[in-house]
Image (cartoon, rainbow, N blue to C red):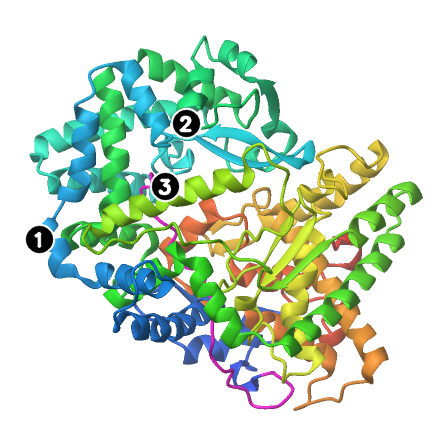
Amino acid sequence: MKKLFATALCALSVLCGYSQQTTGGIDYTNLDQSVRPGDDFFKYATGNWVKNHPQPPIYPMWGSFAKLADDNTNAVASMVQDIAREKHAAGSIEQKIGDLYNLSMDSVRRNREGAAPALAEVRKVQAINDRAELIRYMAHWHDDLLWGIGISADEKDASRNVVGIGQGGLSMGNRDYYTATDSATVKVREAAKQHCVNLFMLCGYSESDARARMNTLWDMESRMAQAWYSREQLRDPEANYHKMTVAELTKLCGGFDWAGYLRDYGYDQTTEVVLGQPEPIVLACKMLTEEPLENLKLMYEWQIISGASSYLSDDFINENFAFNQQLTGVAQMPERWRRSVDLVSGMLGDAVGQMFAERYFSPESKERMLEMIHNLQTVLGRRIMAQDWMSDETKKVALEKLNAYYVKVGYPDKWDDLSALVIDPAKSLYENVIAASRFYWQLNKEKKYNKPVDKTEWLMQPQMVNAYYLPTTNEICFPAGILQPPFFNPDADDAANYGAIGVVIAHEMTHGFDDQGRQYDKEGNLRQWWSDADVEAFKRPAQQMVDYFNTLWVIPGELRSNGSLCLGENIADHGGLNIAYEALQLAQEQHGKLPTENGFTPEQRFFLSFANVWASTTSPQMLQYLTMNDVHSADHLRVNGGVAQCSYWYDAFGIKPGDKLYVAPEDRVKIW
């Protein structure tokens, strides 16, 4: 509720079919064969896809992922709109879906209400005249003004949940927006300041008052930013783990009453916490006790207004979009029905996900996936044993971790009970969003507070086009939303599927052994289970990967890749390609050699399928945004940077010295 902007990409699922030229699963019209594969494999494999799929104006980034999300939005809209047309029994899930959608669609009502729903909350804060009362109010409503509080697995005792506290207080969510001096960031920073002014003016303040309020806010947030950890620092698990008693936390924070705060927050039985980033939290406590009360109330007011702005009148929504245009380069606001479907899918995700899973994910697809996962796990085990830089003892324990992977495919076995969630059409859209937020906070507390970790819980809803590895449960998860073309096609052959979803699966498996994941054991505990010599041996190729990606251009001549920030994902991409390629060979041993098709061998089609997953066009502003905030490399670099470090690609396409992507064998990264 306190972010100034939302990520411009939605990660939803797709129900569409897949247009392809052959039963093998490769659409050869995507290729641009005027480009030599060794010079630019991304353009070679996807050039005509890019030419034939112009970027829709509502997306700052258009590619295979976004197309899946777009197609799925249309399909989910069909389900949601059918429900919304009818009257349903009060309290039924259909009533909740229908009324939430209709509330979002009713722009006439929202425009009549204007800023009033948010200002009702603002007035409650403005009426507070005592610092202690403000802090109690903040805790009671779980409004984490200057930090973030949540419940998750204790990383050094992963079977139990613990209260965690981490840095917060920055509207823009990244300290670099406050400290960087390059022209692109300065431009975004000035746009963010003006956006703040504009939102205050929409709430009735004069321009001079709004600007004064913005300046006060920006000064406070800029001071917070000086203590914040960078995106790179946040990737170090040990540096972000500080377990202590509540009494120790109170002492660290100069006497701030953490016991009272946690009691008012609803965590009254808390005796110890895990502090993520001590310096920002110490500064936050100092600000809460020393900053003028009116400044703290102003920060609270801004949190309410900025969080509410997406659910108020069209002038607020238009202002949000105007800022998002400058941030991401998106040309046109998505239609109201799209925004409303996304809201329903996000707020009632389990209900939408259950409908999705029942209709669009078959048992046969799950069986095919499980077979692929088994093959990929087998290959990764072989590759672990083949590493010449790793000791036999560490290899043995690594295999134990691999074999202990907890695998989730499609959808969960149990769903959240949403019967107590109330969607009241008599109340405003914003009031319903706040009520839902408080419902989910309580649900999360009931599931986790002072309880053991539930390994069956899913962190993603089934309709999402995504996948993940979670180190504290040692699990890999593949929601139904990503198990569709071009990622997974039950009618395609193994060359296409291993090149697409196979690489995704192996990518997630490799995360268990990347620069972060390797620090967690098979039980999910953060501990050193490698020998010191093995750690040092791993760091050498990892640094080689950092150095290589640091040379690559996101925007030629203007913006380079951040190899340190993207290290974990680049290692996972590297492992994913090599593991999936070898798993394809294993599958051909099991089911027979695949034929050459349209002049392309199975091995070549594997790499074409991989590249087509990342077919995309992206605005320059969005590339700037992603490079600053995202731990993944840009799509074209995931392809070109990925294959350039994979020796199997050289063999498949006959890549030679002199080709632009060529990396000498002795210089290629060898890791997993």
Residue most toward the right?
Answer: 392
Badge 1 element? helix
Amino acid at the residue labelled 1: Arg
Name the residue that disc number 2 marks: 265
Residue position marked by numbered label 3 in the rendering: 438
In terms of secondary structure, where does tag 2 sit? helix
> Could you classify mark 1 by the number of other residues whose Cα lies within 10 Å: few (under 14), some (14-19), or many (20 or more)?
few
Percent position of residue 29, x then y = 52, 86
Of the two numbered discs 2 and 1 on the same chain, state the one appearing first in sequence.
1
Q: Residue furthest front?
A: 89
Q: Which residues are magenta?
A: 1-26
Residue that mark 1 sits on: 112
The residue carrying pointer 3 sits among few (fewer than 14), some (14 to 19) or many (20 or more) residues within 10 Å by Cα, namely: some
- Give whichever of 281, 420 is nearer the camera: 420
Q: Residue at x 41, y 31 (%)?
A: 168
Whether residue 217 can be seen here: yes
Judged by depth in the image, the label closer to the viewer, 3 or 1, is 3
- Does 38 appear above or below 267? below
Which of labels 2 and 1 is toward the front?
Answer: 2
Q: Nearer the viewer, residue 544 or 379?
A: 379
